[in-house]
Amino acid sequence: MPHPAPRLLVALYGPTSAGKTAVSVDLCLRIQDELGLPTMVVSADSRQVYRYMDIGTSKTTPEEMRGIPHTMIDVTEPVRKLELETFVSQARGHMEQTWASGGVPVIVGGTSVYVRSLLEGWEVDAVAEARNAIRRDFPRSMAEDAYAVLSRLDPKGAAKIHENNYDAIVNALARAMGNDPERAVAPATRQVVFSVDRSASEIDQRVAATYDHQVERGLRDEVLGLDERYDLLPQYRRLGQKSPNQVVHTHGYTEWFDVALDRGKAVENLNADDQDEVRKRVVERIQTHTRRQRAAIPKLTGVRPARNANDAFAAVKSALEAPVERAAGGKPGNSGGKPAKSGSKAGGSGGKRAGGRSGRGAQPGQSARPDSKRGSRRR
């Protein structure tokens, strides 16, 4: 009897402002129209998971979605960080639903730790257990000791983290201690992984243009709305980098509050010169961040460049049409090569805005279909 087609997982990763949204939506439409398979975009963006941060994160608009359902956007409020295990659990649930309907989930984003955790089947529950244990054994007052342990376990990872950044130290230690290849969750039978990238100079130009467009669309009002909603400036003045609210840890927002504090003003009182300084800091920081994102591309197993949706579609079609290999016991094998071990170290996450949308009828983590309204993350 004929064997069912293998489950396929597609991923598009690349730096901010590379054009991932357009390529991913065009690809999904071709998969649907030419292959007759439903698709769902699983956003892998560590900033787009937060509600009310729309313009400054360039969230995909209903018009840009063009009827393709998107999920893992607007998952929670930014009052505290969404832990990796929560993201992975919810994203895997959406992927399973898509496969159950005979469809193809398409991971799209620039947060490498999100992308790799889904592709490589990381055992994130173990990471959560390790994180809780580390926080018990190394409270914030013992950040220096925790950093010393991390330096022994993962010297390269430690070198990328400031020794006083407690949360980053804890997360890196948890990944180093909690990722057990023997407990990994089996990934999809077949995977097709693409990088969407441009030259560094073109990315830099697009980053600057994206910020200017965000300002034109009302970024200042969005920042003011978030400041009012969460009383951000007083909290940031009091707690600084220890503030749990993710707005002040997101490029495109934090610079407004930094400049306000530096100049002793309320955010709403920043004048044209102040806002020019905000722009300078935002653009420089995001451009620097895109360098780190691009450095993570080679870490993706089997990654290949995709200049456009045509390149991507040809590879997806070929993967679906390839014969299913049979492993011992008559079970489908992995024709796409063995996935990377779940113990692989994570790449850097993105550090990728106010008018809430929580009352619009979409399920948590699932964007409203294109007839709903949405603000617009950096691409």
Image (cartoon, rainbow, N blue to C red):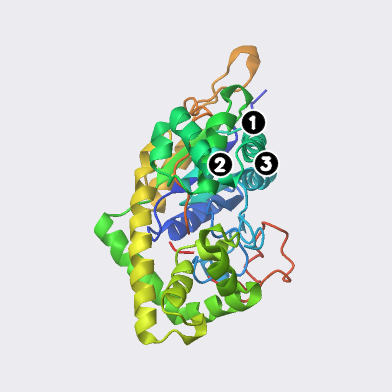
Q: Which mark is residue 96?
A: 3
**Pointer 2 local density, CA inside 10 Å: few below 14, some 14–19, many at least 20:** few
Residue under pointer 2: 142
Foreground label between 2 and 1: 2
Picture layout, residue 282 above or below residue 364: below
Q: Which residue occupies 70% across, 69% down? A: 358
Q: Which residue occupies 41% across, 58% down? A: 16
Q: Quadrant of the N terminus?
A: top right
Residue under pointer 1: 4
Foreground label between 1 and 3: 3
Q: Which badge, 1 or 3, comes first in the chain's sequence?
A: 1
Q: Which mark is residue 87?
A: none
Q: Amino acid at mark 1?
A: Pro
Q: Position of residue 106 (x, y in %)?
A: 54, 48
Picture layout, residue 90 above or below residue 358: above
Q: Amino acid at mark 2?
A: Met
Q: Nearer the viewer, residue 54 or 325?
A: 54
- Secondary element at image label 2: helix
Q: Amino acid at mark 3?
A: Glu
Q: Is residue 252 visible?
A: yes
**Pointer 3 local density, CA inside 10 Å: few below 14, some 14–19, many at least 20:** some
- Secondary element at image label 1: loop
